[in-house]
Image (cartoon, rainbow, N blue to C red):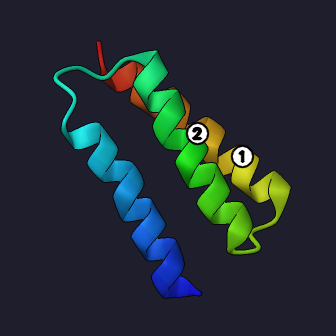
Amino acid sequence: MFDALSEKLSQAMKSLRGQSRLTEKNIEEALREVRMALLEADVHVQVARTFLQRVKEKALAGRT
């Protein structure tokens, strides 16, 4: 289970590496992949939402 989660999270991060700039759209796409990986790993929905919201806030703040 942890191997599958780790692989999916790695794939989400690889999708961002090829981007010249972080945009809200590509951040959303990566977070969608992370959300699916967390839910498939049976992470509680509220925990996943809270985590993803914090990541999104920091990612959007860090791109300026």
Q: Secondary structure at mark 1?
A: helix
Kindly identify the amino acid type of the residue bearing the numbered disc 2: Arg
Q: Which residue is mark 2?
A: 54
Task: Tell me whether circle 2 and circle 1 mark residues in contact (CB < 8 Å).
Answer: yes
Q: Which of 50/16 is in front? A: 16
For disc 2, the neighbor class at 10 Å (few under 14, some 14 to 19, many from 20) is few
Question: Measured from the top left, where is residue 38 in percent x and y?
Answer: 65, 63
Mark seen at residue 12: none
Q: Quadrant of the C terminus?
A: top left
User: What residue is drawn where x is 22% and y is 29%?
Assistant: 19
Question: Measured from the top left, where is residue 24 in percent x and y?
Answer: 46, 18
Q: Which residue is mark 1?
A: 50
Question: Measured from the top left, where is residue 3 in percent x and y?
Answer: 46, 85
User: What residue is drawn where x is 41% and y is 30%?
Assistant: 59
Q: Secondary structure at mark 2?
A: helix
Q: Quadrant of the N terminus?
A: bottom right
User: What residue is drawn where x is 50% and y is 34%?
Assistant: 29
CA distance separating discs 2 and 1: 6 Å
Residue placed furthest toward the top:
64
User: What residue is drawn where x is 70% and y is 69%?
Assistant: 40
Kindly identify the amino acid type of the residue bearing the numbered disc 1: Thr
